[in-house]
Image (spheres, coloured by chain):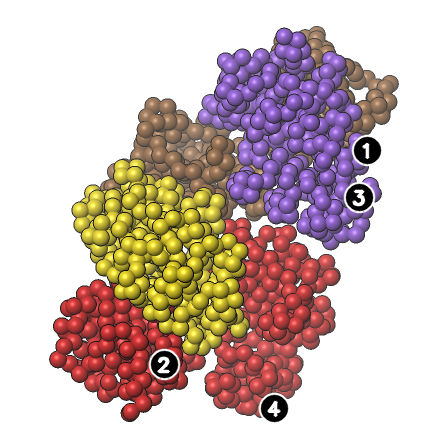
Chain colours: A brown, B red, C purple, D yellow
Amino acid sequence: MKLQEYQAKDIMESAGIPVKPGKVATTPQEAVAIYREMGGQVVVKSQVLVGGRGKAGGIKLATNETEVREKASAILGMDIKGITVKKVLIAPAVNIAAETYIGIVIDRKTQSPVIMVSPAGGIDIEEVAKKTPEKIFMTAINPFLGVLPYQARALASKLFQDPAQIKKTARVITLLYQVFVDNDASLAEINPFCADDTGELWAVDAKILLDDNGLVKHPQNESLRNLDEEIPEEVEARNSGLSFVKLDGNIGCMVNGAGLAMATMDIVKYFGGEPANFLDIGGSSSPEKVITAMNIITNDPNVKVIMVNIFGGITRCDDVANGIIEAHNKVGIKVPIVIRLTGTNEEEARKILSDTALIPVGSMSEGAQKAIEIAQTR
Amino acid sequence: MKLQEYQAKDIMESAGIPVKPGKVATTPQEAVAIYREMGGQVVVKSQVLVGGRGKAGGIKLATNETEVREKASAILGMDIKGITVKKVLIAPAVNIAAETYIGIVIDRKTQSPVIMVSPAGGIDIEEVAKKTPEKIFMTAINPFLGVLPYQARALASKLFQDPAQIKKTARVITLLYQVFVDNDASLAEINPFCADDTGELWAVDAKILLDDNGLVKHPQNESLRNLDEEIPEEVEARNSGLSFVKLDGNIGCMVNGAGLAMATMDIVKYFGGEPANFLDIGGSSSPEKVITAMNIITNDPNVKVIMVNIFGGITRCDDVANGIIEAHNKVGIKVPIVIRLTGTNEEEARKILSDTALIPVGSMSEGAQKAIEIAQTR
Amino acid sequence: MAILIDDKTKLVVQGITGRDGSFHTGQMVEYGTNVVAGVTPGKGGQEVHGVPVFDTVEEAVKVTGANTSVIYVPAGFAADAIYEAADAGVELIICISEGVPTLDMARVTYYLKNKGVRLIGPNSPGVTSPGYCKVGIMPGHIFRKGNVGIVSRSGTLTYEVVNAITEAGMGQSTCLGIGGDQIIGSNFIDILKLFNDDPQTEAVALIGEIGGTAEEETAKYIEAHFNKPVVGFIAGRTAPPGKRMGHAGAIISGGSGTAADKIKAFEAVGIPVADIPVQIADLIKQKLSK
Amino acid sequence: MAILIDDKTKLVVQGITGRDGSFHTGQMVEYGTNVVAGVTPGKGGQEVHGVPVFDTVEEAVKVTGANTSVIYVPAGFAADAIYEAADAGVELIICISEGVPTLDMARVTYYLKNKGVRLIGPNSPGVTSPGYCKVGIMPGHIFRKGNVGIVSRSGTLTYEVVNAITEAGMGQSTCLGIGGDQIIGSNFIDILKLFNDDPQTEAVALIGEIGGTAEEETAKYIEAHFNKPVVGFIAGRTAPPGKRMGHAGAIISGGSGTAADKIKAFEAVGIPVADIPVQIADLIKQKLSK
């Protein structure tokens, strides 16, 4: 779950990380009102969950009310990579003297959080990793010990030379780790972490991704979701305990299990078709889940046929069959459904589905080919 | 560092442990004023840092203003094991249905905190350990993991059978461990931890000892010290970085190093004398420390002679010699000083001490025997 | 022989009174697994499918000698259940729970490493050694005892492969899912070491998916150390970057973790990669007939 | 031979620019210890008594190959210094700092156990192997190379014993203080194992004190496993209960940890206990002449 810059900054600021106090506006009028209290030079920053805001013109400086109104008007409503800007952050500008990078991620190899720092801040860290890998310094953190003072100090000394700045940076690294752990984040990043012309240090931009699995421990963080920027079907799927990703094809897929769902998309592509989505109905599927899944798939006008692929383990085939029949009756599905069911309670499922309009197939390959055939003729 | 019951309860209550909210009075009038707001049946409890308050008559029930005034008057000013009661805690009485024990200590063997619980609460846990050891249940806690939910649950189920009470008790165990860790305690104890006649659970008495070494991490806890109940010389010694324990004999001891200081007391006793104190001037001793040490020793009117025993490692013998001479000049020490100095800068020290009234000796044994001889003739 | 579980397995089911725990206990008992105990705090003394329930794993182990645990508790309680099993002396823990917080797992795996306890999962469909027993949620009827080891990051996709192998007239030594999360107790290499030493296993099917670089590292390990034929499959060739494909670990991020990279890594060390799951059976047959 | 430190010791001093660190670095260099590096964050590039100072232990180890560390930092920073040394690959850490919080040490000892790094202390006077080198704060001039191993919970009391042994015409193999705190890195038994295997050591003096039950456990260990003569001393026969006698660990609590108990435990397994420190030399002489 991605947080907006202003949300990430709020969290970091309450943890004690130095952030210039900004406010969010949804209209140019609000932006001006905020500016009146702030004065001086400010930066007007679009709040969207995509990268490249600066290049897209979504970040501007302003030094008076007129400029603030102009810039805010220009940015609000702007389209950045398909997302309409609905909020801008107004914050005092920092006279940047040095830009560095501090980030924390989960590393699969060491099975622990890893802190990365670089004196080359202000640009995408993946760029730095590619072009100047010697400018990235990493320390794996023992999840029981957390960042030790000596580790924070050593990392900080890669960013600054001045002893006072090293000390403050070490503190920021320690606090950022606390933010990471306290929220079960999967990424916590300050880029750039800047020294201004007086030597003060500031988190000028901030990014936090929360571990979706960690939300069970922090239910209050659910309120930070930015539903605006999500695809409504993906939201609906998540709320129903389904996993859904929208794609561009015309063959809807409904599968139990993430691996099998990917393999189903892949096999559709392999035989020359185009999958319309990834959809995992998960284990322990109830008829209600199947109904929701069917609804979500058929919401997409591109979908010409649905391929159901169920291999029962926890999922019982009869539950799925009942769900599909119910969905048919309730929702009134207009597109053909190719259906492959095997595994637990397979026989019962077959009985339930006999004498319906559904098209049974014996294997994934057969199902994919059948679905493609139907899609091509509709 | 020992905390009073009311201090321990304050800490536990802010951690979320259920404690009947009480208040502390230093006069019977205050006690009555507190009672007026409280009403009902209350308990008037002497606040002193020694055990056996109940047996000594320092804990009484009261059910109206007159009783509260009477009991508070009786308890305030009372002497319990040499300590004069200066404060009483007034708290609503609990109608006790069951008394259990929950305690956390540091275990040297497993090198970790250990949680002990017993369904036999309300009496000294060491009594329980002696008479019915099968009623004590212990779990060593991994210092990185803390109390795991399964551990808290298993311990709680040794105290209560009712599922709701088990759940609440597990929570109290977890919170008590948090109190222990957050304050670097060496003991955190609830005895008794009671169920009342409605099934509610209460920490009826509470005890916390803080790890003296841990205070460096929690300087705010210094304000919780009960200087009233300490021997003034021990307080003065601690404030000067010395370690002092008062004893009943007449031979003052000043030694560097705890082990050698104990061995010096032991050797005095071995040769038939009685040590007046334990005093470790520590490493890196400055002349100021030696002066303070001399002052503290000679404050005791019993002291007839002082035995100085210095084996220099970090401590430099010349520092000690200078300190003793300075102390002599400033304080005007009236008792003879037997002095044994060996180790770092021993030669310089000997030179400094020549032509003084001090009595040099060559060994611990000689020093002890000489000191005893002097003590017997004065 | 088989790996991990066999006729010496004595299983304790953590979360046995829940919907999944109870259902699959029945399935496991029916398959012939020696389920000796179940655990649900506060429900000690009950029975589920004839299996006695205890309040704690410690008691269950003490009374029944259980040496393997399977965990069906909700995600938020999974870490505690794993610690409890490890502390009670269980040697092998198989965690089915899905959605366990990643940082919980970082701590758990560090703890277990120092304790010498083996964990499979979380988010694993379990382990099946046909002819001996099954632990987890795999459908038992698709298996047949044989010489193919199967290790996978997936659940149902694995059943698909098992089914294909069985229908092709072959069978499995042991089949297991290591779990689809970012941090898991045992990885491909840990399991391959066991297959290498297992005389029953003559070939291995390795089923990977997008996200991370486990397949790339495994390819290097196989080239250097593994002595038996391996065939592979990678799910997610059509997955878009930056999207989590169901499994917490199945995400292409920063251009790394693509199916193409993984397929390349496999093929570079001579591991044939099936285009569709059912082909795995053919590839194994070819390898074994050589 | 000696134990722990010898002519292969390459020492890094943590906290070298502090008052104690700098003074004792001079003393150690003078004694002949191979002090290869010092560490104080932010002071890299300086020199102390000719020893180069680094910002981190990692650098110091990388540049100088240091294999042993001695720590002179203030109590609140000691745990961090120990972790830093352990993580940098130092094999032996000797912590002089006094007053380290007990829970810090609970975490540190658990961490080191799993890392296989040996810690002496905290609150240790150090280790001296006469003829090879000394690490810590012991006065070098009282030592003489010989065959008596000395292990103690104390500092200055140990010097007293060393002195007595030297003056009696004998000498020491290795002498060390394990520290007077409740939780310490190495206990008597850990050290006795090393003395048992050290051919230079022919007898051991064991100097205990009130508090805890380490001496009682050591007596049992000696009876079962230790092959060389041992003589003992226990400080604190006159200590009152419930009072901390200087050392954090020297306290009689709940009637346990008395000198009488410990003396009894020693004598029960045939370890003679000296009444006054100087007698230890006589007792050793008797044991060795048998």
- Residue C174, compared with residue B345, is above or below; it is above
Q: Is residue C242 above or below residue A192?
A: above
* Residue shown at the point (62%, 34%) measured from the top left: C120
Q: CA distance from mark 4 to mark 3?
A: 63 Å
Q: Which residue is mark 3?
A: C51
For disc 1, the marked residue is: C30
Q: Confirm whether circles 3 and 1 share one chain.
A: yes
Closest to the camera, between mark 2 and mark 3, is 2
Picture coordinates of residue D71 (x, y %)? 32, 52
Q: Nearer the viewer, residue B283 or B234?
A: B283
Q: Residues within 10 Å of mark 2 (few under 14, many from 20)?
A: few
Quarter placement of the C terminus of chain B? bottom left
In this view of the protein, can residue D285 be seen by the observer?
A: yes
Q: Pointer 2 and pointer 3: residues touching (CB < 8 Å)? A: no
Question: Where is residue C5 shown, x and y percent of the image?
Answer: 69, 32
Q: Secondary structure at mark 2?
A: loop
Q: Is residue A314 above or below residue A223?
A: above
Which of the two residues, D119 or C205, is positioned nearer the viewer here? D119
Few, some or many C-alpha atoms within 10 Å of disc 1 (few <14, some 14-19, many ≥20)?
A: some
Q: Same chain, marks 2 and 1? A: no
Give the Cα distance between marks 2 and 4: 59 Å
Q: Distance between the Cα atoms at labels 4 and 1?
A: 74 Å
Q: Sequence-wise, which precedes: disc 2 or disc 4?
A: 4
**Mark 4 = which residue?**
B66
